[in-house]
Image (spheres, grey):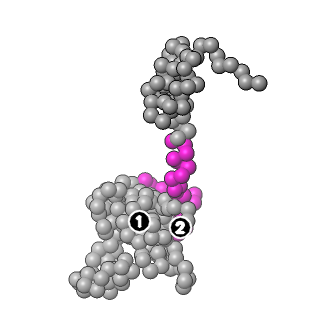
Amino acid sequence: MFHSLPRSLPRSLPRSLPRSLPRSLPRSLPRLLPRSLSRSLSRSMPRLLLLILPLVLSISACNAPSLRVATFGSPLIGESLEQVELASVLAAPEQFSGRTIEIRGEVVDVCQKKGCWLRMAPTGSGEKDGVFVKFTCPIDGERLIPMNAMGQPVRVEGTLVVETISEAERRHYASDAGKTDAEIDKIVGSATQVRIASGAAHVEVTPDS
């Protein structure tokens, strides 16, 4: 047995609803509903949106690729680390030579062959040389630091070393970085290099790295 529609609804609703559904439903719905119900819906819409918005944002966050912190090298455990601004180190590296420090920045270069070293610079500085961090090369067929570490935040701890590297070393590292023969040929003479020794690098990378 069918029940009759509530008396508060217009009698024409069953006939007009199929015809109005495709185009005019959003406009006609407030007129078809009782005034009290229409006002109630209008007042409850903002609260409904406030309830739905966090759910939508949480779903979007779940779909975004998450990052994990990967550690390379040997972390300094139990040692007192002096936190220093990376820009200050690059401005006057001799002042920090031989000191065990912690610096933060972004990865600006990675060894393309085995991922055995990286270069870091102050975040957003556009600096390409920065501080050099070298690790033990992995065995053949394996890789240490992934290429997608490029541009990611990095925290490095270790002893700062200011050294002079030969032309041959500079060319070797340039080859590791994927420089062209023409670019490598332009490297002439020795140069000063700022390096972190006997430490570790903590880099944010994607889980599939």
* Residue 190 x/y as whole percent: 27, 81
Disc assigned to residue 209 = 2
Q: Residue at x 55, y 65 (%)?
A: 208
Q: Is residue 97 visible?
A: no
Q: Nearer the viewer, residue 4 or 27?
A: 4
Quadrant showing the N terminus: top right
Q: What type is the residue that disc 1 sits on?
A: Met
- Compared to residue 41, the image places residue 174 above or below, namely below
Q: Which residues are magenta?
A: 57-83
Crowd class of label 1 (few under 14; some 14 to 19; many from 20; radius 10 Å): many
Question: Quick one: SS at disc 1?
Answer: loop
Distance between mark 1 and mark 2 Cα atoms: 12 Å
* Secondary structure at numbered mark 2: loop
Which of disc 2 and disc 1 is earlier in sequence? 1
Query: How many residues crowd around disc 2 within 10 Å: few (fewer than 14), some, or many (20 or more)?
Result: few
Identify the image quadrant of residue 117. Answer: bottom left
In this image, 168 relative to 104: left or right? left
On residue 130, the disc is none
The dot on residue 150 is 1
State the residue at coordinates (55%, 62%).
Answer: 207
**Where 142 sits versus 50, above or below?**
below
* Residue at x 34% of width, y 69% of height: 194
